[in-house]
Image (cartoon, grey):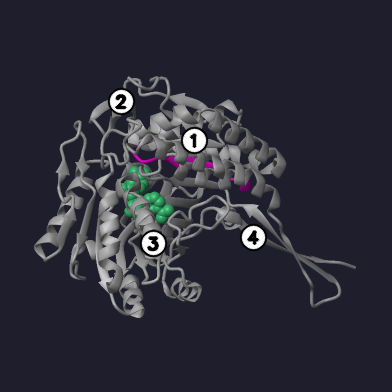
Amino acid sequence: MLVDTKYGMFIDGEWVHAGNRAVIDVVNPATLEKIAEVPLGSADDAKMAIQSAKEAFEPWADLTARERSGYLYRAYELMLQQKEKLAELLTLEQGKPLKEALAEIEFAASFLLWYAEEGNRVYGETIPSSKKNKRLWAIPQPIGVVAAITPWNFPSAMVTRKIAPALAAGCTVVLKPAEQTPLSAIEIMKIFEEVGLPRGVVNLITGNPAEIGEVLLNSKDVKSITFTGSTEVGKLLMKGSASNLKKVSLELGGHAPLLVLEDADLDLAAEQALASKFRNCGQTCICTNRIFVHENIKEVFLEKLVNKVRNLKMGEGLNVKTDIGPLINESALKKVTDHVNDAHRKGAEILIGGKEWDGPGGYYFEPTVLSNVTRDMKIMNEETFGPVVPVYSFEKLDDAISVANDTDYGLAAFVFTNDFNKAIYVSEKLQYGIVGINDVFPGTAEAPFGGIKESGFGKEGGHQGIKEFLEWKYISAAVK
Ligand code: NAD
């Protein structure tokens, strides 16, 4: 087995391995080989983790920001020192090409560094009083125990993007990673253990999502839920949090449009559309899901895009030549196939790809470009989360913006143009939490990432990210 079985859940500073209990198999999606197993944690395990985080909270919150920052900074250094090993493990459990896994580890580490710094800048406010004998101020304080629930598509970065600001703010954490990818989360716990983080400050639970989720939701000791995943589960968690009024922060699904205007640099647009659509096999929340291209440049753009797609090498992520890996599981493959078949039936033309690829055992789908798409097709309305892109042409810019906005999602959108005024106009009209202008990689530790509409609320990254874990206390003092 790939991973030492002594590791598993991390509760109250101790490793809880599977022992005699039931396990969750971890499977390499590139080959469908079992690579590890982790314990199927129970409701009681989750309760113990919450109790441990509760006991650890006050002493952790009482440390100075500088002391907390020291732990995060050391974790950042350790993560970078091990980046090759961590990237390989990430590829094995998640499937993405090694070069992307390496970039993810660096991205994950960047949140540890950013919040090591940002934790030292959590300022309060003094308020000029309307009365002479009053002094007023407001101080930010850590909210308490945080439950973090993360998805499989970025098994490392989604964990640090939540844990780093929570710890920097003075909160303690119970993490529940996706059942498909617990190994990267275990590695992050090992790093925190190695830097000597006090017992209970971070805990890791693996298990049945609904069962663990219910414990987290019902516990009055958990003050906040920070979640990244599907809109469907996000809504469940928000409903569940209402019973004891937990704070909720939700990073949910997306359906990103990419607009190519008539004056755009078409080589750049095709290259970036390729990167945005096919990285992580299309399984990224901000992946382009629809391309809108001006009628007059459609043919040239499509030719450039299809030529680039033709050169993509599909296969196991560990092979350094691989550009595009497998989908995570069978249901992902079914959804992608369904979107392509539905579009084809309704008149879309398949310019390249369009079918499964017979890879080394995993769930592979060829990178696919569709043209002549219409708005009634599923692919124009739902998050595909796979390597397929529909190309829709437009004549009037306002029509393209209007179709791009006609979705319940509102995470990220992209526009390609060399006209500064048009870039500003489009970026302001698009109803999305993030807009990239000639840029499909807006995610970075120093900027606020997050959606609007049914893509959720709350920000991760930037000085905004730490505020999700703070609450404001107002203090009024009467003086003589
Ligand atoms: P998912 O919602 O199925 O699972 C996400 C997490 O929620 C996993 O840990 C899962 O075990 C857990 N979960 C599932 N049911 C639960 C329940 N009833 N109670 C508690 N936890 C539960 O999503 P996924 O398939 O793992 O991830 C893909 C989705 O995540 C896509 O929609 C993608 O767009 C979204 N995503 C969003 C962002 C963002 O920043 N907005 C980033 C990455 C992924």
- Which residue does the numbered mark 4 point to in the structure image? 472
Of labels 1 and 2, earlier in sequence is 2
Residue 199 in picture, x, y percent from top left: 58, 31
Q: What's under tag 2, amino acid-wise?
A: Ile
Q: What's under tag 3, amino acid-wise?
A: Ser
Give me the C-alpha separation between circle 1 and circle 2: 23 Å
Q: Under 8 Å from ligand 1: the CB of mark 3?
A: yes
Residue stretch in magenta: 168-181
The label number, if any, that marks residue 438 in the structure image: none
Residue 455 visible in the displayed image: yes
Judge whether 254 appears above or below 146 on screen. below
Q: Secondary structure at mark 2?
A: strand
Q: Residue at x 79, y 72 (%)?
A: 128
- Which residue does the numbered mark 1 point to in the structure image? 203
Judge whether 127 appears above or below 153 on screen. below
Residue 37 in picture, x, y percent from top left: 32, 26
Between circles 2 and 4, the one closer to the viewer is: 2
Residue 274 in picture, x, y percent from top left: 33, 52
Circle 2 Cα neighbour tier, 10 Å, few/some/many (<14 / 14–19 / ≥20): some
- Which residue does the numbered mark 3 point to in the structure image? 455
Q: What's under tag 1, amino acid-wise?
A: Asn
Q: Residue at x 43, y 66 (%)?
A: 452
Q: What's under tag 4, amino acid-wise?
A: Trp
Q: Secondary structure at mark 4?
A: strand
Between circles 3 and 4, the one closer to the viewer is: 3
Of labels 2 and 4, earlier in sequence is 2
Between circles 3 and 1, the one closer to the viewer is: 3
Of labels 3 and 2, earlier in sequence is 2
Circle 4 Cα neighbour tier, 10 Å, few/some/many (<14 / 14–19 / ≥20): some
- Which residue does the numbered mark 2 point to in the structure image? 35
Q: Secondary structure at mark 3?
A: helix
Q: Residue at x 41, y 27 (%)?
A: 8
